Image (tube, coloured by chain):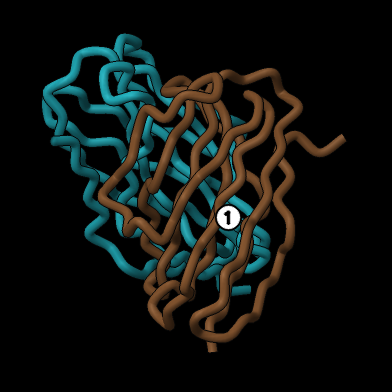
Amino acid sequence: DTAVSQTPKYLVTQMGNDKSIKCEQNLGHDTMYWYKQDSKKFLKIMFSYNNKELIINETVPNRFSPKSPDKAHLNLHINSLELGDSAVYFCASGGYYGYTFGSGTRLTVV
Amino acid sequence: AQTVTQSQPEMSVQEAETVTLSCTYDTSESDYYLFWYKQPPSRQMILVIRQEAYKQQNATENRFSVNFQKAAKSFSLKISDSQLGDAAMYFCASASYNQGGKLIFGQGTELSVKP
């Protein structure tokens, strides 16, 4: 029933580990996004995919790699996690006319 | 480049009263939307209201309305009859067709509601 679902909601991991966050939407949108919300609550786009094709990559470190197996899924894989990667990551789908966000994943790197 | 600025980091309102949150933006695009999102402590991003740049009429959603001044690039949110449940972080944001649909957010305004 959930329009945009992200898993997991919370992720605590050690520095240097590799982790993935999954996102799925059932709204039929062609475009999906990843946003990062930092400790000051500032939100900034990281990536967007349109029908499995990468269209926005906002100077994100290469350790972050999005993958879209189909237009309903956009996963985020992070290699060699660093303390500075601690943040809330939001998946969203839609377009410039409107967006639906997932509930966010709070990533804590210790 | 598009920018969105919220100059009020914190605001406070008495329950049942009216409060206005300010937002200014800058864009060279002609086809764009403006949004206000609410983020309560649950961290869910909830769309409050949106405005299409082509429409002159200000958008309204129940107790929420906007004052869209296109020439001044201003997009303020008015909350009437404030309720305790309105307490949250509010983000102003813009998105344009030519920018791949990416949302540009302001810094946010933390709204507290006093009983």
Residue at image coords 50%, 84%: A15
Question: Could you tell me residue A14's position as x and y percent?
Answer: 57, 86
Question: Could you tell me residue A72's position as x and y percent?
Answer: 68, 28
The colour with which the image depicts chain B is cyan
- Side (left or right) of B82 relative to B79: right
Residue at image coords 38%, 46%: A45
Residue at image coords 69%, 71%: A10
Question: Could you tell me residue A70's position as x and y percent?
Answer: 65, 26
* Disc 1 target residue: B82
A81 relative to B111, above or below:
below
- Does dot 1 land on a helix, a strand or a loop? loop
Residue B59 visible in the current orientation: no
Q: How many marks?
A: 1
Q: Quarter holding the N terminus of chain B?
A: top left
Residue A25 visible in the current orientation: yes
**Rendered image quadrant of residue B70:** top left
Please rate how many residues cluster around mark 1, counting C-alpha atoms within 10 Å: few if below 14, some from 14 to 19, many from 20: many
- Chain of the residue where label 1 is placed in the rendered structure: B
Closer to the camera, A27 or B87? Answer: A27
Closer to the camera, B97 or B4? Answer: B97
Residue at image coords 74%, 45%: A5
Question: Which amino acid, by three-letter code, is at mark 1?
Answer: Ser
Which chain is the one coloured brown? A
- Side (left or right) of B86 relative to A4: left
**Rendered image quadrant of residue A52:** top right
Q: Residue furthest bottom?
A: A110
Q: Quarter holding the C terminus of chain B?
A: bottom right
Question: Could you tell me residue B4's position as x and y percent?
Answer: 24, 45
